[in-house]
Amino acid sequence: MDLLNTLVEKGLRREPPTREEALAVLATSDDELLDVVAAAGKVRRQWFGRRVKLNYLINMKSGLCPEDCSYCSQRLGSKAEILKYTWLKPDEASKVAAAGVAGGAKRVCLVASGRGPTDRDIDRVSRTIEAIKERHEDVEVCACLGLLSEGQGERLRAAGADAYNHNLNTSEATYGDITTTHTYADRVDTVRQARAAGLSACSGLIAGMGESDEDLVDVVFSLRALDPDSVPVNFLIPMEGTPLEREWHLTPQRCLRILAMARFVCPDVEVRLAGGREVHLRTLQPLALHLANSIFLGDYLTSEGQAGQADLDMIADAGFEVEGAGTTTLPEHRTGGCAPCGGDGGGTCGGSDGSAQPTPGAEGNAQAPSGLRKDLVSVRRRGAGTDLAPNA
């Protein structure tokens, strides 16, 4: 296919596709899907080989968020029966982080629900970063605390944070349909503040919220313009108790096309397979490793992922290898900064436990399943905030 040959050539040169080419990837048929995966896989291997970076989420403070992000189970007014607890103490968070590191995680992502951190919160998270680094000197730490105020990024950097995550989530045109308590511009500003503070910027999207193909292309091109080191791609997890618990619009095939489009637009950036992969990709998860070079290990913020060992087995069986602590994730030409972070299924950090109001028929060539798959969604009941061992 001429389109795919063109996209591979551009990706190997770090040249972005046109908007029309990106839209064409999303419009390919299921018969062409393996060709799309193979083409995007060439670009992925050029810049990241067969390495898979493992990241581990810690929900530092769960639930009771004053923001109304429609995709989030921790949102204002959510009836989702998730774990709710206040800030973990530094030693508690450090113990949870140790489980992720023992499972092979190279990066630990500290996430807290809320509009943004207070100065006291920054102090609290700084002590947690120091506790984790004291125990695991080489581990990367990413913070995801919401909207940053002036000087807070610098304080996190001074405490040892390597990265900051704040996702754009969807296109600017549709953002107001998802959240009313802050703006798309607020999110863009926080990503820029993180970069200015010397933190590696991580920002991604959530697919499956009723957006059109044009919206998906818009947000990925906006992310490219912001130039984050990492782009987590989340797939909506419609949890019971959220505004759109009945909205299921993604198929495994559409998820793969979205990942491929993201890889072509951001060829040399860490593309992370994030929240919702188990729910929507299901048995096709190994194919996604040919597109994304990074995943989350184990559970997410408010939902459970597959067993950590199953993640490791999947990586090995697919012919990939876990990226070691001594390996630099990003290609040499991008290593003027640090490295990346991630997102999940439920909070300010790339969350997808919930959803925004979808527009019927807006999913391009995707078809909604005939029934809801509530059996695929499990609320997290282990790890941070519980007495049970974390999944890693």
Image: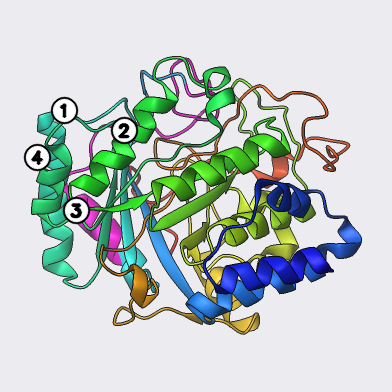
What percent of the width, then of the height, locates residue 279?
A: 67, 49
Q: Nearer the viewer, mark 2 or mark 1?
A: 2
Q: Secondary structure at mark 4?
A: helix
| Residue lying at 21% horizontally and 73% vertically, measured from the top left | 138
What numbered label is drawn on residue 198? 3
The answer to whether any part of residue 258 appears in the image is yes
Q: Earlier in the sequence, mark 3 or mark 1?
A: 1
| Residue lying at 56% horizontally and 47% vertically, measured from the top left | 234
Q: CA distance from mark 3 to mark 4?
A: 18 Å
Q: Are marks 2 and 3 in contact (CB under 8 Å)?
A: no
- Relative to 257, is 206 on the left or the right? left
**Residue type at tag 1:** Thr
Q: Which residue is mark 1?
A: 118
Q: Are marks 2 and 1 in contact (CB under 8 Å)?
A: no
Q: Nearer the viewer, mark 2 or mark 4?
A: 2
Q: CA distance from mark 1 to mark 4?
A: 9 Å
**Residue type at tag 2:** Asp
Q: Earlier in the sequence, mark 2 or mark 4?
A: 4
**Residue type at tag 4:** Asp
Q: Which residue is mark 2?
A: 189
What percent of the width, then of the height, locates residue 273?
A: 55, 58
The answer to whether any part of residue 146 appears in the image is no
Q: Is residue 58 magenta?
A: no
Look at the picture and state if 311 lies above or below 177. below
Q: Which residue is mark 4?
A: 123
Q: CA distance from mark 2 to mark 1?
A: 17 Å
- The part of the chain drawn in magenta is 69-98
Q: Secondary structure at mark 2?
A: helix
Q: Decide: few, some or many residues near mark 2? Use Cα within 10 Å; few <14, some 14-19, many ≥20.
A: some
Q: CA distance from mark 3 to mark 1?
A: 20 Å
